[in-house]
Amino acid sequence: MKIRYFGHSAFEIIGKNKINVLIDPFIKENPSCPLSSDELNPDIICVSHAHSDHLGDTIEIARKSNSYVITNYEISRYFQRYGITAIGLNYGAKIDFEGLEIRMLNALHSSSFDFDRSTPYGGNPGSFLINFKNDAKIFHAGDTGLFSDLKFVIGDIYKPDIALLPIGNIFTMDPEEAAIATKWINPKIVIPMHYNSFPSIRQDPDKFRKLVKNEAPNTKTEILKPLDTLRFTI
Ligand code: ZN
């Protein structure tokens, strides 16, 4: 499995079976992403919530690549108006594709569209458990604060191999809370996200690494720079 980071909360995951999943593709307006969205060609795009730094370039990429989009019901209705094949889920729902399954789970956050003159309701914010069959299980937390599902649902039931967790503060968990979430989830690898893309979410990922070492000594912290790729084999 290959996990490529684009900065902020945007990741591309390519399984052994070559299925390409893009999550929260905030590319064009992302100051930490040096890539053009034209270079991406996902089979599936997951959108955790409607905020523009997560919904990002989904419409352009999905149209060009003919991707399926997995998101919540309200955002799926918005994408469908653009002719995109969007599948709207709600909490707990799982969708099966050949080679992988994706479950939408809770996130403690908000979700509204960032239009020029309004911020209409964008459904419930979510997180994703992406289970590449015969390969690794990935948890992308979306934007979230610390809440008990991370322990009792993600950690105790779904047990992902790799957790992608926000550490930026202001809109999400800070490094201290994200380290506690890492302890609860107990993944093999944790990758911090949603930091240093804007001045308001400046954080030192090495501080997070040290906190994880104390809280969750069995978990390795992998700090990725934009366009870094992590290879992982179960
Ligand atoms: Zn958000």
Image (cartoon, rainbow, N blue to C red):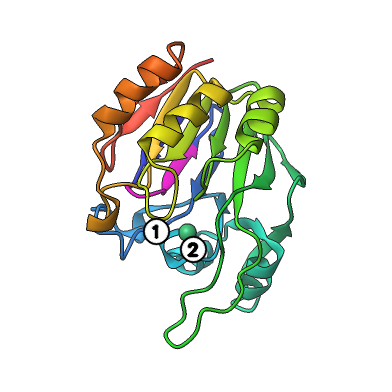
Q: Nearer the viewer, residue 41 or 160?
A: 160
Determine whether the residue tagged by mark 1 lies in a helix, strand or loop.
Answer: loop
| Residue plotted at (46% across, 52% down) | 41
Q: Residues within 10 Å of mark 2 (few under 14, many from 20)?
A: many
Q: Nearer the viewer, residue 114 or 13?
A: 114
Specify the quadrant that holds the C terminus: top right
Name the residue tied to disc 1.
26
Based on the displayed image, in which of its 4 quarters is residue 17 positioned?
A: top right
Percent across and percent down for residue 92 are: 76, 45
- Residue 9 lies in the magenta-colored region: yes
- Residue 16 lies in the magenta-colored region: no
Residue 151: numbered disc: none
Q: Relative to 201, say whether 174 is above or below.
A: above
Based on the displayed image, in which of its 4 quarters is residue 116 positioned?
A: bottom left
| Residue plotted at (66% across, 37% down) | 149
Magenta extent: 7-13
Determine whether the residue tagged by mark 2 lies in a helix, strand or loop.
Answer: helix
Percent across and percent down for residue 219 are: 45, 17
Percent across and percent down for residue 65 are: 51, 59
- Residue 191 seen in this snapshot: yes
Q: Nearer the viewer, residue 91 or 94?
A: 91
Residue type for callout 1 = Phe
Residue type for callout 2 = Leu
Name the residue tied to disc 2.
55
Q: Relative to 234, say whether 222 is above or below.
A: below
Left or right of residue 157: residue 17: left
Percent across and percent down for residue 122 are: 61, 70
| Residue plotted at (41% across, 48% down) | 9
Ligand 1 under 8 Å from disc 2 Cβ? no
